[in-house]
Amino acid sequence: MIVCRSKAEIAKLRRVNQLVARILAEIRRMAVPGATTREINTSAETRVREAGAVPAFKGYHGYPATVCASINEQVVHGIPSNRRLADGDVLSIDMGAKLDGFYGDCAVTVPVGRVSPEAERLLRVTEEALFHGIEAVRPGARISDIGAAVQRHVEAHGFSVVREFVGHGIGTALHEEPQIANYGPGGRGPRLAEGMVLAIEPMVNLGGAGVKVLGDGWTAVTRDGSLSAHFEHTVVVTPEGCEILTLLEDDAARARELMGAAVQNNW
């Protein structure tokens, strides 16, 4: 069942998603050569709990940490560790929180030090693909229009869209209906309606689309060892299009450049 949220519920969702976005903006600055992903995870959990929220991922189906920290060929669900980041790495940080009964979810991939031109292009195209997907969100559109827009942009630049992991609805549970694939033809699936809340999260590989899960049962990596990037925003469908609940005011100008008029001011 797909839930359309009330104004009061959306206000709570906006609050928790803004919290997640603020913490993610803080901890991404820790991604420097020599830092460990365990340090980033510890800082994230401290900030979440200081805000009166709880980590959304920790304990979810047994996941052991507050953030997913995926390095280089790791696509998603990388478990924080004492591995030190090195100059030229790319780090995907995915985190969520629960506050007042509602969930927030957001992800970003950041360069560590100076990265290769192809890594820079991968990150840029993946973030652009996210905003192409967001731009497809409007009442009356179909769920699959989001993934079609993502895939079109990614493949036009010679990269591959991961098939095994998808976006999702979000609200009083971390993962709700509908599932949102990042590929496939448009014009299919349920119609979007005002009040639907969606976590849109393309995962894009520099090489082939294939992935596999390592022996820890969580960390997904590219089959060919190529770099991967992951960006995510949580949005709510509005009468005019959508509001990005995880968009910070300081980032609004950049978002407008990436997707134009679909970004709304809500501060």
Image (spheres, rainbow, N blue to C red):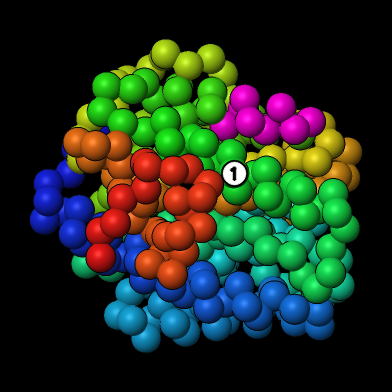
- Residue under the image location 40 percent in, 66 percent down: 248
Task: Find residue 100 and report its horizontal and vertical position in percent.
Answer: 21, 67
The amino acid beneath tag 1 is Glu
In the image, the segment drawn in magenta is 150-158
Please tell me whether residue 230 is drawn above or below residue 81 in the rendered image. Answer: above
Helix, strand or loop status at disc 1: helix
Q: Is residue 4 above or below residue 79?
A: above
Nearest the eye: 237 or 174 = 237
Q: Is residue 155 magenta?
A: yes
Q: Nearer the viewer, residue 197 or 122?
A: 122
Up the image or down, 204 lies above or below 57; here it is above
Q: Is residue 61 visible?
A: no
Position of the C terminus, as image quadrant, is bottom left
Dot 1: few (<14), some (14–19), or many (≥20) neighbours within 10 Å? Answer: many
**Residue at image mark 1:** 128
Residue 6 covered by magenta stretch: no
Q: Image point 45% across, 60% down: which residue?
A: 253
Main SS of residues in magenta: helix
**In front of the other: 10 or 62:** 10
Residue at the image position 31 percent from the left and 50 percent from the top: 264
- The reply, left or right, for residue 81 in relation to residue 3 is right
